């Protein structure tokens, strides 16, 4: 899962320049805006001079900035789409509904983008992003998928352009309910009865937990590099030894203190956008083995990532309640595999650091159809690294919904069955 890799990546880059995870027309603009908005003092000669505290002020960001950067990123998409803020309700302070537990009783909204397929009676696929990401991460996939599906992608509550209420959960159970119940409220608001559910990384964990609780609404479950299929007992000897060192103890303390990568980006002020740019260039450039981002894609994605990371902390604070240090699930999905009620396809990039063997172990206990597909030239973000291979895997996973002869359709060339 991208969580621990990102978390450690943020900290290692912080040592070199300082962080992790911005766009052209806004890349330079955001930096310039941040400097322009920094506090200034007037010298006796009437000129302006910078004070050190002013340089530490943040580059401006807000939900409006996120939506604007999202609009720029989605301008790359050719398929018509609609963006909406879906109201999932409101409640008084102290409400038992998990996402209302804050000092505010204002309504909560889920940022949603919908691509209607040109094909009549197309199945609906709902896409859920991972930790520290947002629905815009799927920008390379929308056009291809919309040829076969009605595509709906969301920002989970507390992330992206969705509402960011105060995160007041204090347990694993409450934290899971925050995401599962808010997603169910969104489903009701959208009047969706049944759909194919796709989740990436932490979004895969949420999707799987949702399908366990509401299987009647999920026609097929697609888990892409899903988190949650390992526990502390699966910890490698090397990681065990590292956790016993003083460095491991410090990082474990930071983890348990809910020190997130996003806090680093916010704390870096004017340097944040540049460091996010360096991360994006490295992660989706030299580290990718599939279809590299072009310059425009890289700039637009960087802008988008910066604003989604630097905005108010909310959903990101789920980290320590869902996973222990090392990204091991506190309530592993492996332990629930015998309760699975929805046919499932696991998709992994061949270079994904997420261990697909956990899915193999889960499959042994499942009483529903389950397949595992590995996509070459792709890592944890296989849908960005190798979009064409990823699309082939998704189409194959959903063949009984979109193919006239699903029973005789073989695995597309290049994909690997595990």
Image: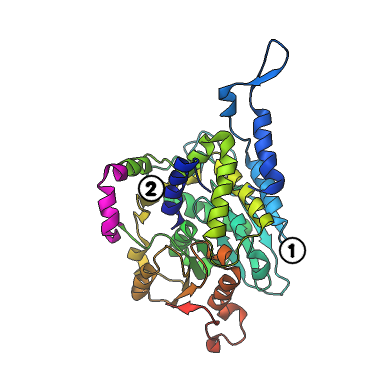
Q: Are marks 2 and 1 in contact (CB under 8 Å)?
A: no
Q: Quadrant of residue 26?
A: top right
Q: Position of residue 374 (x, y in %)?
A: 47, 73
Mark 2 to mark 1 CA distance (whole Å) = 39 Å
Q: Position of residue 207 (x, y in %)?
A: 48, 61
Q: Residue under circle 1?
A: 78
Q: Residue under circle 2?
A: 321
For the residue pair 394 and 108, the one nearer the viewer reads as 394
Residue 92 visible: no
- Which of marks 1 and 2 precedes in the sequence? 1
For the residue pair 276 and 82, the one nearer the viewer reads as 276
Q: Does the magenta-highlighted stretch encompass residue 234?
A: yes
Specify whether 330 is left or right of 99.
left
Q: Position of residue 220 (x, y in %)?
A: 51, 71
Q: Does the magenta-highlighted stretch encompass residue 265?
A: no
Give the residues drawn in magenta, as a range.
232-249
Residue at 37%, 52% (x, y): give it.
323
Q: Quadrant of the N terminus?
A: bottom left
Q: Residue furthest bottom?
A: 408
Residue at 55%, 78% (x, y): give it.
396
Magenta segment's dominant SS is helix
């Amino acid at each position: 899962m991208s969580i621990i890799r990102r978390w450690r990546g943020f900290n290692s880059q912080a040592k070199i320049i300082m962080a992790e995870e911005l766009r052209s027309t806004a890349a330079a603009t955001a930096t310039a805006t941040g400097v322009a908005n920094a506090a200034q003092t007037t010298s006796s000669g009437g000129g302006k001079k910078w004070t050190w505290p002013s340089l530490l002020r943040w580059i401006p960001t807000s939900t409006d900035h996120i939506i604007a950067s999202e609009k720029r990123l989605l301008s790359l998409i050719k398929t018509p789409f609609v963006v909406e803020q879906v109201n999932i309700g409101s409640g008084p302070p102290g409400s038992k509904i998990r996402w209302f537990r804050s000092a505010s009783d204002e309504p909560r909204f889920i940022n949603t983008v919908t691509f209607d397929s040109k094909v009549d009676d197309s199945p609906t696929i709902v896409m859920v992003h991972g930790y520290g990401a947002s629905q815009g991460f799927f920008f390379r996939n929308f056009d291809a998928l919309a040829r076969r599906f009605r595509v709906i992608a969301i920002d989970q509550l507390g992330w992206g352009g969705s509402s960011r209420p105060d995160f007041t959960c204090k347990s694993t159970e409450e934290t899971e309910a925050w995401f599962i119940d808010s997603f169910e409220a969104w489903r009701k608001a959208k009047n969706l009865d049944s759909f194919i559910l796709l989740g990436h990384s932490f979004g895969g964990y949420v999707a799987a937990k949702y399908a366990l609780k509401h299987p009647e609404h999920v026609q097929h479950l697609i888990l892409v590099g899903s988190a949650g299929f390992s526990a502390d007992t699966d910890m490698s000897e090397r990681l065990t030894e590292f956790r016993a060192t003083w460095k491991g103890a410090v990082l474990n303390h930071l983890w348990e203190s809910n020190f997130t990568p996003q806090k680093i980006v916010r704390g870096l002020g004017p340097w944040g956008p540049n460091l996010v740019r360096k991360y994006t260039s490295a992660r989706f450039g030299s580290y990718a083995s599939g279809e590299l981002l072009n310059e425009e894609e890289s700039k637009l994605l960087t802008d988008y990532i910066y604003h989604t990371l630097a905005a108010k902390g909310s959903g990101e604070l789920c980290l320590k309640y869902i996973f222990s240090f090392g990204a091991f699930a506190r309530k592993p999905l492996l332990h629930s595999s015998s309760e699975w009620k929805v046919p499932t396809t696991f998709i992994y990039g061949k270079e994904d650091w997420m261990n697909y063997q956990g899915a193999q172990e889960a499959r042994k206990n499942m009483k529903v159809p389950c397949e595992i597909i590995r996509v070459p030239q792709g890592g944890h973000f296989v849908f960005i690294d190798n979009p064409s291979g990823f699309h082939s895997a998704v189409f194959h996973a959903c063949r009984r919904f979109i193919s006239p002869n699903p029973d005789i359709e073989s695995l597309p060339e290049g994909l690997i069955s595990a």
